[in-house]
């Protein structure tokens, strides 16, 4: 069948391509219904990934956060119209030790091959999961799964004293980390640290919030999550090093294009653990679906960080969504009607 794929060909230039989509006896055909714009998508859209990377990756359809409806299942296991979340990480091999999202052979949607900005998507059977919550909120499952991966890693590595946990960064990622930690560790005191005061009101479920230039001098945390990324991540990590107690774990989630300097001397003196986290796998998605379906308030809280919903019926609408997202406080989602 002929499929329409909307590919970025240069910064802020999207082209409609027609491709021959092969229908085999196993893959499931899914029509995207809601897509969510990520900072990674914006780095491609605005060209900030750099000329070399852009030349290697483009043309390419963006978006790795999406849900959709099943339109064809050759085996008949899924009914037509079933809501499913699509998993962007595509493992190419199995490993008994290394998770699929860390294997260098894995392929990732919108980072080397086409993302979900398509009329329909052919998905491997092991890369979709049905869900029952509202699709416009379920589109945040991918980001939630990234957080779930980080929290599960933290659970395995960090020491058991978890009386106080700090989160640096009060954007989308910091919000979901705080929400998942609140459910995972209800007895812990959760603190959020950020630079944008007006966003702090969204974090009503945590114990306290602080602007990074107004932290009490005697405040300390047992562990911390860095959710800042970019050029400010170095500053955030170094501030965490100052405020974390000895032998704490610093979970790193913020993505930076360039290397950042950190105070390794104090990492050594305090015996700190730096724990890297990236992307997610099927199990993380499954746990994220269970989280949303088990706690009604989780979906209610997540709905508050949808800053704008753009109905997409044309390429101009796609540009509108990406351009508006640059000025939105939290998430921009696209209702995919093209």
Image (spheres, grey):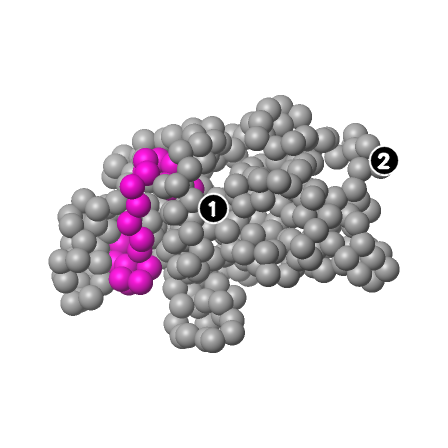
Residue 227, horizontal then vertical, whole percent: 62, 45
Lateral position of residue 214 relative to residue 51, left or right: right
- For the point 46% across and 75% down, which residue is it? 95
List x then y, in percent, for residue 59. 39, 56
* Quarter that holds the N terminus: bottom left
* 309 over 83 or under it: above or below: above
Q: Is residue 159 visible?
A: yes
Question: Does residue 320 appear anywhere in the picture?
Answer: no
Q: State the residue at coordinates (40%, 68%).
A: 91
Pinpoint residue 117: horizontal percent, then vertical percent.
33, 48
Q: Which residues are magenta?
A: 121-140
- Relative placement, left or right, of 239 versus 70 is right
Report the front residue among 281 and 188: 188
Is 104 placed left or right of 252 in the picture?
Answer: left
Compute the Cα span from label 1 to label 2: 32 Å
Mark 1 in CB contact with mark 2 (< 8 angstroms): no
Few, some or many C-alpha atoms within 10 Å of disc 2 (few <14, some 14-19, many ≥20)?
A: few
Task: Looking at the picture, tell me which residue is in the foreground, 312 or 75.
Answer: 75
Q: Answer few, some or many: residues within 10 Å of disc 1's Cα (few below 14, many 20 plus, some between 14 and 19).
A: many
Dot 2 corresponds to which residue? Answer: 217
Query: Which residue is at 31% across, 53% downward?
Result: 129
Query: In the rendering, at what x and y percent does residue 88 appear?
Result: 39, 56
Residue at coordinates 58% horizontally, 40% vertically from top-left? Answer: 186
Q: Tell me the residue that label 1 is attached to.
A: 144
Against 104, residue 301 (above or below) is above
The stretch drawn in magenta includes residue 126? yes
Helix, strand or loop under label 2: loop
Q: Secondary structure at mark 1?
A: helix
Which badge, 1 or 2, is on the more N-terminal residue?
A: 1
Image-based side of 11 in relation to 265, left or right: left
């Amino acid at each position: 069948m002929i499929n329409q794929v909307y590919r970025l060909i240069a910064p802020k230039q999207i082209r409609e391509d027609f491709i021959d989509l092969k229908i085999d006896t196993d893959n499931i055909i899914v029509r995207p219904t809601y897509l969510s714009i990520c900072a990674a998508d914006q780095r491609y859209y605005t060209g900030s990934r750099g000329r070399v990377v852009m030349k290697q990756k483009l043309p390419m359809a963006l978006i790795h956060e999406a849900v959709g409806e099943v339109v064809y299942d050759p085996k008949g296991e899924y009914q037509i119209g079933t809501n499913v979340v699509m998993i962007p990480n595509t493992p190419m091999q199995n490993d008994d030790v290394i998770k699929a999202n860390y294997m260098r052979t894995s392929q990732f949607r919108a980072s080397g091959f086409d993302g979900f900005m398509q009329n329909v998507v052919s998905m491997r059977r092991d890369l979709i999961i049905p869900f029952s919550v509202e699709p416009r909120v379920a589109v945040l499952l991918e980001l939630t799964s990234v957080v779930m991966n980080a929290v599960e890693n933290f659970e395995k590595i960090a020491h058991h004293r978890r009386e106080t946990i700090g989160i640096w960064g009060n954007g989308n990622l910091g919000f979901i980390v705080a929400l998942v930690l609140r459910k995972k560790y209800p007895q812990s005191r959760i603190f959020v640290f950020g630079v944008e005061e007006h966003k702090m009101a969204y974090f009503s479920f945590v114990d306290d919030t602080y602007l990074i230039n107004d932290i009490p001098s005697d405040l300390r945390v047992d562990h911390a999550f860095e959710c800042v990324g970019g050029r400010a991540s170095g500053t955030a990590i170094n501030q965490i090093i100052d405020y974390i107690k000895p032998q704490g774990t610093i979970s790193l989630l913020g993505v930076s294009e360039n290397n950042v300097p950190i105070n390794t001397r104090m990492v050594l003196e305090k015996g700190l653990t730096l724990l890297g986290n990236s992307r997610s796998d099927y199990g993380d998605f499954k746990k994220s679906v269970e989280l949303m379906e088990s706690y009604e308030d989780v979906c209610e809280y997540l709905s508050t960080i949808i800053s704008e919903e753009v109905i997409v019926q044309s390429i101009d609408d796609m540009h509108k969504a990406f351009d508006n997202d640059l000025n939105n406080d939290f998430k921009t989602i696209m209702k995919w009607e093209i």
